Image (cartoon, rainbow, N blue to C red):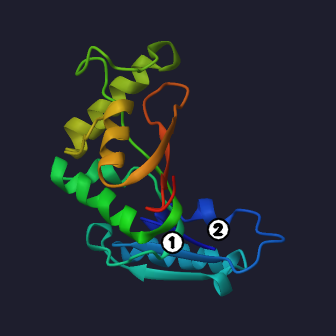
Amino acid sequence: MTLASVPCGFMADLLTLDFNGATEINLVGIDLDEKSLAGARRLASDLGRANITTFEHANAWTLERTNTYDILTSNGLNIYATSPDSEMELYRRFHLSLRSNGLLLTSFLTPPPALNDASPWDMSSIDAEALRKQCIIFDDIIGVKWRNYSTADEMKMKLKCVGFGEVEIEFDRARMFPTILARKVSASAP
């Protein structure tokens, strides 16, 4: 089984899994940032996983893999997409990279109440003061430009549009940053 993490800065999630009893496991960390790759290599070595791990310096938007991975993880990389077309290209690359019946495990940002009346955010689970400070840090100090908010229905539509057949969404407590499990369904599957 081949599991990929894009970007590999989140590779610790895979490296720390219990693989006892599993055979033929190959972990692949893919990242554009050399520092993230170096950190993941050190962690793999420290955990005794260097023998089942490879690392690639690559851009997720230009991955040229076809039917390579059984599972691909990407924790929120889509928030860095520069346009709707760019976001869809990322999902296309993920879909192409997966083997038939492969799984994509990813996440996305839901729209805040100030931007969408249908926002799913559970404000009773959110520390309003901490949220205000976070907005100041990201918007005013750092100047972060990513957003790419989507509703659950929009995300399902996007992923199905690029070929994923089954899409499940699991919301976090605050309903801000849900997790997606999308399966690449074989063309011959019913």
Left or right, 68 with respect to 33, comes to right
Query: Tag 1's secondary structure?
Result: strand
Relative horizontal placement of residue 123, taking residue 32 as reference (left or right): right
Mark 1, other Cα within 10 Å: few <14 / some 14–19 / many ≥20: many
From the viewer's perspective, is residue 75 above or below residue 37?
A: above
Query: Which label lies toward us, 1 or 2?
Result: 1
**Residue 150 figure quarter:** top left
Which kind of residue does numbered mark 2 sit on? Leu
Q: Is residue 159 above or below residue 176?
A: below
Q: Hey, which quadrant is residue 54 in on the image?
A: bottom right
Query: Hey, what amino acid is under mark 1?
Result: Tyr
94 w.r.t. 67: above or below: above
Q: Are marks 1 and 2 in contact (CB under 8 Å)?
A: no
- Residue bearing mark 2: 15
**Residue 69 got which mark?**
1
Name the residue located 39 percent from the left edge and 76 percent from the top edge: 66
Tell which residue pokes out farthest to the bottom in this image: 51
How far across and how far down the image is residue 30, in percent?
43, 73
Q: Position of residue 16 (x, y in %)?
A: 69, 63
Q: Quadrant of residue 109?
A: top left
Residue shown at 62%/64% (left/top)? Answer: 14
Q: CA distance from mark 1 to mark 2?
A: 16 Å
Q: Position of residue 124 (x, y in %)?
A: 50, 12
Nearest to the observer: residue 68 or residue 55: 68
Specify the farthest residue to the right.
21
